Amino acid sequence: MTLQMFVQSFINSILSGGVLILIALGLTIILGIMKVVNFAHGEFYMLGGFGIWWFSAEQGLNFTLALILSVILVGLLGVTIERSLFKPFREKAFPSLIISLGILLMLRAATQLSFGLVDHSVPAPEAFKGLIQISGAFLSKERLIVICITLALIIGLYGFIKFTKAGLAMRAVADDLTAASLQGMNVDRISSLAFFVGSVLAATAGCLTGPIFYVSPNMGAEPGMMAFVVIVLGGIGSISGTVIAGLIIGFIEGFGSIPFGTSYATIMVYVVLLITLIFKPMGLLGHAER
Amino acid sequence: MSLLEAGELSIRFGGLMALDRLDIQVEEGEILGLIGPNGAGKSTFINVVSGLNKPSTGTITFKGENIVGLRLDQIASRGIIRTFQVSNLFMSFSVLQNIQVGFHLRSGIGFWSALLGNSKTRQQERVLQDKAMEILDLFKMGHLSHEITANLPHGHQRELGVAMALAAEPTLLLLDEPVTGMIAEETLHFMNTVRDITKRKKTTVLLIEHDMTAVMGYCDRIVVLNFGRKIAEGPPEEIKKNQEVITAYLGEKKDAQNPGPAS
Amino acid sequence: MLKDNRWTTHIVLPVIAALLILFPLLTGNKYYQRTITTLAIAVVMTSGFRLVALTGQLSIAQAAFMGVGAYCSTLLIMKLGWNTWICFFLAGFAAALVALIVGFITLRIKEIYFAIATLALNELFRLIWVEWDTLFGGAAGIVNIPSPAPILGIPLGSVVSFYYIAVFLLFSITVVMVRIERSRIGLIFSSIREFDTLAASLGVNLMWEKVKAFMIACFFAGMAGAFFAHLQHYISPVDFTLMDSVMFLLYGVVGGVGSVWGPAVGCTIMIFIPVALRLIPNYNPVVEPLIFGGILILVMRFCPDGLVGLFQGLVSSWKKTGPQKGEKEHVAA
């Protein structure tokens, strides 16, 4: 492997890992706080991508504005779904899981009906265009910018959960929903907030990768699935675990796909997951059951 | 050698020492009362012995075998069966079915014979059914055998929880506040029944109770806990007079207005 | 569960069995026979999903186990020339073996690791089948799978012969399901779903019981897969996707996990719906997932015990006026 290839793979690994982490963080927050297993989470990523495509390519808005609009709309959709469909199934992992499968089917089919089963391309903003040369490797500015934004968001979320009042409330609810509601915390509002943050993060990931890849109704399937692999590998409920697992998977995909091809890299990810679960049934940083 | 020996048992939840270097021996055939104010660590002790919680430090041996680190079902299969304080039943099952689950370790019906359901298995199933009715009759619940458990009155639910544990024919039965919420008459009848059965089957009993008057008359020996430590141990008459025990309960009475011991 | 009236299994079941056996004699219509064959396979698969659900677990990989059986039997027959009927059972054992391994890794702990792992498993198998093309034929799959070997000199391969094999498979799993529910096995499975800690404290080995249920379910899924391969004479990774697994879940939930009849009712209705919809002119099949998703949400929201559960609830509330609470058994509640 030449140095050039190494740098390229490294950047690709960070990119796909970062995107996965963005999706998985929302998932783990929702799962931790509401004990709701949302298999439709990948669809928020897809809708984010469609949002930015529709606002920028179809409506001609500038990229930043399109991103903000798309992300907020998906966030609101997330809250609506939480309020109307998931609310009765809080703390009930399996009924909520079945509900989420229904939502997944509906969102995917609705998108396909509205926009067709074709790939749409999102025009990249000027700032994204061009290449940067690092130690002989040409890297698109686009990828570097996306990586920077992703890292900023992950750090921001970490700070939000660790240091703000709302974040503290979230952790309290995640620890014990009943106790938290007895202490007068508004569990409804915290759940909605968690769902808003989760869907916004996934949608942001969809917006950011929109110009790099294409946008299509099935684009949420694979990242959605991988996000689950990430949180199980990292340990459900652990934010640091999610970040670490996301990077591990990103690197397996980034470096594994060059010699073996993408599918083998994905198979390798699953094998790593299974082997990890043999030795650490609760994931890398998962807590033992109470 | 005692039947169950807990040595230097400690468990920490956050900053709180729920059990603090506790030594407890349970002798074969006795009814040992474990009493103490709320939060004294009584239930935690049962949780640790039954395998629900892992102790931070310390040892537990049962018939000389170390049982720390075993799963709940492994400990149960060695003959230690516990009851739960709240939500102690399979609520959507019938009363009879609850007892039938209790037979799990003793049914003697293997997977394949249960699946094939030949005449020998059916015979065994009938015997189990009769045994279940026998147990229910002892608690005067025979007529309720097909009732859905959730529809039972509270007192019967508590009794059923214990009946189910007895169905497993334990060597050591751990009862976690079995008479909570029962009125005095119910308590009397219930405790008499439990004593009769366990004495007849030579089952050793560890009885946890918050209200010590309710059970004092049934225990051969009593251990008193407070803040995870053993503060007294001895026959009931001795415990009644123990100054430290009275202080522990009175102190709590002032704070939480819980029923203290009748002097 | 556990309280289907005895007459349903002693009278209704034999009657349905007799009707299914006589059906081809009453009508020679190949289309109906083929439809019932497909339906029977779906019921076998959904019953497997239901069996796992009895222990309080959700398996979203039943289609993958069907695929394991299909590929296993097909390869043994076509590459090694083994007898089709031996391979039929080996397919079941292969799927059960995979279930054993996966179960031991993911069923040790509570929560939802198993559900997520099965989901990932389906995708893992699909990738293996696609990528390892020298063995599994890649995305194009395997073609020209022969019909099963003759039994007692009777050649098999006609629509009717497949119909009878499917009906036989359906009976086998139904009998097993009924036996499980009537015996201690089902009681113990349900006790895990109802309250696992209590079951464990009475000596139930939670993981092993869950693994058992999963293995039985996958054994039948594997056999169904082997049969499916013969039926189609062609298999490819698209036959055993995650979506197919989700469909088995949908059938199970719609019919109701609480009763032996749930899978049959769920499959019949849910397979009939798209057939009926296609009669609409200018019908766009893309709306099907939309409809299925909507049905899944509505059923979970308004009758979580499925249609059979709803029906039983109505019947028992007509029969007596006493309180009915506690009779409900939610999916993996």
Image (cartoon, coloured by chain):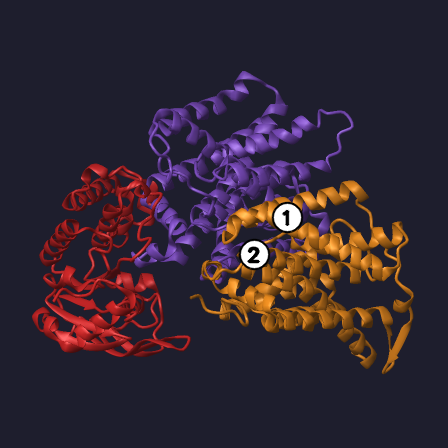
Chain colours: A orange, B red, C purple
Residue A208 - label: none
The quarter of the picture where residue C268 lies is top right
The quarter of the picture where residue B71 lies is bottom left
The reply to whether discs 1 and 2 touch (Cβ–Cβ < 8 Å) is no
- The residue closer to the viewer here, C172 or A62, is A62
Locate the C terminus of chain A and report the quarter of the image it occupies: bottom left
Does residue A166 sit above or below C125 in this rendering? below
Q: How many marks?
A: 2
Residue lying furthest top in this view? C26
- The residue closer to the viewer here, B218 or A53, is B218
Q: Give the residue type at disc 1.
A: Ile
Do marks 1 and 2 share a subunit?
no
Locate the N terminus of chain A and report the quarter of the image it occupies: bottom right
Please give the residue where the numbered disc 1 appears in the rendered image. Answer: A81
Which is in the foreground here, disc 1 or disc 2?
1
Q: Position of residue C157 (x, y in %)?
A: 60, 32
Q: Position of residue A179 (x, y in %)?
A: 45, 61
Rate crowding at label 2 as few (under 14), some (14 to 19) or many (20 or more) other CA atoms within 10 Å: many
Inspect this view and state whether residue C62 appears. Answer: no
Tell me which residue sits at (63%, 73%) in the image: A244
Tell me which residue sits at (56%, 49%) in the image: A87
Q: Chain of mark 1?
A: A
Mark 1 to mark 2: distance in Å?
Answer: 21 Å
Residue lying furthest left in this view? B237
Q: Position of residue B117 (x, y in %)?
A: 30, 40
Q: Give the residue type at disc 2.
A: Ile
Tell me which residue sits at (45%, 50%) in the image: C56
Asked which secondary structure carries label 2, the reply is: helix
Q: Chain of mark 2?
A: C
Please give the residue where the numbered disc 2 appears in the rendered image. Answer: C116
Tell me which residue sits at (88%, 59%) in the image: A62
